[in-house]
Image (spheres, rainbow, N blue to C red):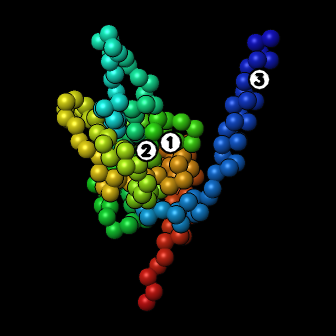
Amino acid sequence: MHSTISILSLILICCSALAQTAGRASWKDIAVQSSSAVTGYIENQMLVVRRDKMLTTSDKGIVNLPNPKDYVVGNIIQLRLERIVKNDGLLKAGGVVEIFLPGEPSEGTPILMTKRKYLVLLAPLKSFSKENFKATIFNPKVSPEKEEVIKPATYYSIVNDSNGVQEITARNQKSIDAAIKEIEMTIQKPRK
């Protein structure tokens, strides 16, 4: 009985993995939409919140903790750049780029882990709700009490959601190298 369940679990895992990769656009197609393509390590993650929606108090003075979806605007990911494959002219190897991931992690939203290395295709952050301009960045590494107002023009977004990012590991290095070659093919060479 246990072996049947294990086999069925394995089949379901394999099918879900195939379903996720089957709909993925090619790196070349995603790169055409990007302004930059980089590799680097995640250094820090900061929560972007609406402080005014974090706590509410009832008529009896009881503090209510709302659902995070009511106050979490997104996350800021700080990526230490190692290699710049495609550059919009603003990025430098060794520098840090800040990436805004909207909302809570959900299906299609990339989940990035601190201290891991990624290939990321970026574009300047374009859409940002006017209501979310009231959001603040909570960065406990700097100071838990310090709040920074978010300035959308200074951030990037990941192109094509989770399809525009891939963790780099020793096991997938060859496929990452192939992806980088695909991306480099989209870069127009200056005419002589």
Q: Which residue is mark 1?
A: 110
Label 1 and label 3: CA atoms lie apart by 29 Å
User: What residue is pinned by disc 2?
Assistant: 101
The dot on residue 7 is: 3
Residue 88 appearing in the image: yes
Residue 127: image x %, image y %? 43, 54
Q: Dot 1 surroundings within 10 Å: few (below 14), some, or many (20 or more)?
A: some
Q: Amino acid at mark 3?
A: Ile
Inter-mark Cα distance, 2 to 3: 36 Å
- Give the foreground label among 2 and 3: 2
Q: Quadrant of the C terminus?
A: bottom left
Q: Secondary structure at mark 1?
A: loop
Q: Residue furthest front?
A: 59
Q: Which image quadrant is residue 41 in?
A: top left
What's under tag 1, amino acid-wise?
Pro
**How many C-alpha atoms fall within 10 Å of the one at disc 3: few (<14), some, or many (≥20)?**
few
Relative to residue 147, is residue 32 depicted above or below?
Answer: below
- The reply to whether dot 1 and dot 2 touch (C-beta < 8 Å) is yes
Cα–Cα gap, marks 1 and 2: 8 Å
Query: Residue at image x 28%, y 35%?
Result: 138
Q: Residues within 10 Å of mark 2 (few under 14, many from 20)?
A: many
